[in-house]
Amino acid sequence: MLSGADGALARRDFSLQTSRPTWNAPHWAVILFLVGLVVPWIISLGPLNLSVYRFVLLVFVLPCLSSWIRGTLGFKFPDLALFFYSIWAGIALFAAHDGSAATQTSGILFIETMGAYLLARRYIRDAADFRGMVLVVTMVVLALSPFAVYEWITGNKPILSALSTIFPTVEVTMMTPRWGFWRVQGPFSHSIEFGLFCTSTLALTHLAWGHGSSFAARWFLTAAVAGTTFLSMSSAPISCLVFQAMLMGYIGLLWRNSSKWTILWSIVAVGFLVAQFGSNQGAAKFFISHFTFDPQTGWYRVAIWDFGSASVLNHPLLGIGLADWKRPRWMASDSVDNFWLLTAMRYGIPAVVLLFGSCLYMMVAVTRAKSADRTIEICRVAYLICMTTFFFVGVTIHFSHGIYAWFMFALGSGAWLVDTRQTKLAGAAENNLLTRDRLLSHWNTREQSQVWN
């Protein structure tokens, strides 16, 4: 089932495409950024606490902005939406806090949003670049796996313990074991962040990189990503593993149907309506409360939704910034396990509309674009499954720090797919075998004549 999407796409008659999938070694800035995501150092630079990936983005944000402003990268709606989201969030922070705190926080938000997004836009421009990026991030997950197994069994934090001897790292988080094993934190602040980082690479690894790879290499890397994700022992990342497997199986079953994405979103819409009107909780509360290992955790997340939504309605335009939100005294923690809700709470409804709209627009645009190249089509499916996972898991997890930067980078890494178009010749050849053969014959003859001339 996991191979269904790739196998189905490979069986289609993509005319004029006979070359084996290739990959490009990513630009060194991309490699540093992806590796920096799992280096937990916190380095003080004046009033700022910078991570390794933030240093990379700080260096490259201006060159990337310059390329975008000059039109080198082209202009797309999500570019502008994310830019204005960053500006609006900055205005909300200045409205809620003093100049120093607002400047630091809004600056970091801009760097992690536009810096990570435009870094991907600048250096990932085709399928070969995309597959090279996927290979690097897969190798990063693979490198984490032995340390994660050790932590899962013993509860010790080998990565944090070793790296903290050089620079300060994120705080150690000890959580109650589940099923007799420790929840793996890895180099992140929480086991959920570790699990989300790993699980977000599953479809990318299996499809985008697995296409054209050997059977053994493909399944070894897929199993490594899935197994490392499971070590987080967190419900949301593990649910995402199952969700991605189901999506890949669905694409494999309906590969001949050109309306497969329309059918999928129709199924999602029907499921939403059933949950909305068929339960006494409503759709949002239903999904929030049921995608957890612990029923008490689900109940607490429902309470977060109730009081967090009330905060949004009380401060709809600019939100409350980083201030504490009103809630009952028994809700001791101020954390909000909902990325979309917390964005609205902090920066107002316009901010979450711009952010969510940019992501949704990108996904729809990538879905509508077509190509006659099977490798591009497989990369398209992998990208859409990855982003769909972020969409839904954002309801139960907050993306912060490295995970948020990775989300923005992943969003920008598929922008090149919007510009892929299936040519009229290729489209005609796919529907007409005789025309296809003539086109291939003409194409080969023209290539030979160019060689001889």
Image (spheres, rainbow, N blue to C red):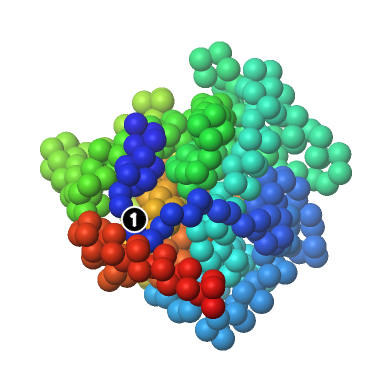
Which percent across, then down, holds residue 141? 61, 38
Q: Nearer the viewer, residue 263 or 298?
A: 263
The residue positioned 79% from the left and 57% from the top of the image is 44
List x then y, in percent, for residue 11.
32, 44
Q: Residue furthest bottom?
A: 70
Q: Is residue 220 visible?
A: yes
Viewer can see residue 262: no
Which residue reaches farthest top? 180
Count of marks, rendered view: 1
- The answer to whether residue 36 is left or right of residue 282 is right
x and y percent of residue 15 in the render?
A: 34, 59
* Residue type marked 1: Phe
Toward the viewer: 441 or 36? Answer: 441
Secondary structure of the residue carrying tag 1 is loop
The residue depicted at 72 percent of the width and 69 percent of the height is 59
For residue 6, which quarter of the picture? top left
Q: Residue at x 42, y 75 (%)?
A: 76
Q: Residue furthest front?
A: 452
Residue 264 x/y as whole percent:
23, 47
Residue depicted at x 22% and y 56%: 433
Position of 229 relative to 170 (above/below): above
Of residues 244 and 313, the one drawn nearer to the viewer in this rendering: 244
Q: Is residue 146 left or right of residue 327?
A: right
Q: Which residue is mark 1?
A: 14
Looking at the rendered image, the quarter that the C terminus falls into is bottom right
Q: Is residue 305 left or right of residue 255?
A: right
Question: Image quarter for residue 426?
Answer: bottom left
